[in-house]
Image: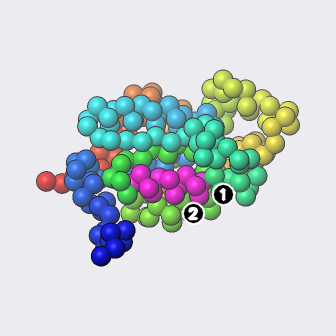
């Protein structure tokens, strides 16, 4: 008998969800730089964690210093950036973990690719909506100013397009609501979708 080969299958996602007492989903937050994606994502992560959910948050800065540190901001590299993020998110989801992704993901094509990788039934698209003016006023890194002077090329909202989602699952207008109000609206939408039914 060869001990190094087995017909056993890995533990499945349903069993892992039962162990964690939650339904895994990918909460995909899209919006302009400065719209509040990571701020809302972090606050939502904390609130879900308080309620006993196991959550993983991914954002642009985090992945670009690690798994995607070889990518730039060309159209091709942006697609590859999102492709890798979607694949990583799918791995977390298959472990039963709720994943919050905070990425500009500027075009319908890019977001459709992410949804196709993750699966339509598990992909919750959340549009973090704020006007360009508000986003520029919030820009503590000065990225918009650099983009307007040509120091940064292909910057979303200035020299590179952002496609407003046509049919997002949820819209959070961060230029009209407080962080607390926004997070509560997100919780009201998300909690029923990640709670295991008795």
Residue 177 horizontal/vertical position (percent):
46, 31
Residue 60 horizontal/vertical position (percent):
60, 41
Name the residue at 84% across, 34% down. 151
Relative to 169, does residue 151 appear above or below in the rendering?
above
Helix, strand or loop under label 2? helix
The residue to which callout 1 is attached is 79
Q: Would you call the spot at circle 1 few (<14 residues within 10 Å), some (14-19), or many (20 or more)?
A: many
Q: Are marks 1 and 2 in contact (CB under 8 Å)?
A: yes
Q: Return the residue nearer the eye: 9 or 139.
A: 9
Q: In the picture, residue 75 is in which quadrant? A: bottom right
Q: Return the residue nearer the eye: 94 or 136.
A: 94
Helix, strand or loop under label 1? helix
Disc on the earlier residue, 1 or 2:
1
Q: Does the magenta stretch include residue 85?
A: yes
Q: What stretch is highlighted in magenta?
A: 82-93
Q: Return the residue nearer the eye: 38 or 88.
A: 88
Quadrant into which the C terminus falls: bottom left
Name the residue at 45% across, 44% down. 100
Relative to 116, does residue 22 appear above or below in the rendering?
above
Relative to 103, does residue 6 appear above or below in the rendering?
below
* Residue 101: image tag: none
Q: Would you call the spot at circle 2 few (<14 residues within 10 Å), some (14-19), or many (20 or more)?
A: some
- Residue 4 in the figure: left or right of residue 137: left
Q: In the picture, residue 175 is in which quadrant? A: top right
The residue to which callout 2 is attached is 113
Residue 96 horizontal/vertical position (percent):
33, 52
Label 1, label 2: how many angstroms apart (C-alpha)?
8 Å
Name the residue at 55% across, 52% down. 85
């Amino acid at each position: 008998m060869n001990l190094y080969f087995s017909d056993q299958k890995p533990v499945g996602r349903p069993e892992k969800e039962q162990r964690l007492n939650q339904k895994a989903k990918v909460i995909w937050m899209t919006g302009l730089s400065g719209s509040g994606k990571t701020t809302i994502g972090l606050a939502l992560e904390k609130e879900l964690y308080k309620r006993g959910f196991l959550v993983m948050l991914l954002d642009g800065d985090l992945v670009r210093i690690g798994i995607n540190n070889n990518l730039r901001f060309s159209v091709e590299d942006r697609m590859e950036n999102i492709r890798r993020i979607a694949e990583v998110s799918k791995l977390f989801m298959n472990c039963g973990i709720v994943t919050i992704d905070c990425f500009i993901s500027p075009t319908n094509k890019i977001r459709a690719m992410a949804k196709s990788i993750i699966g339509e039934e598990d992909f919750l698209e959340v549009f973090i909506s704020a006007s360009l003016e508000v986003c520029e006023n919030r820009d503590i890194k000065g990225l918009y100013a650099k983009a307007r002077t040509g120091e940064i090329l292909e910057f979303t909202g200035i020299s590179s397009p952002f496609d407003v989602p046509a049919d997002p699952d949820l819209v959070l207008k961060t230029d009209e609501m407080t962080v607390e109000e926004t997070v509560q609206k997100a919780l009201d939408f998300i909690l029923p979708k990640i709670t295991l039914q008795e």
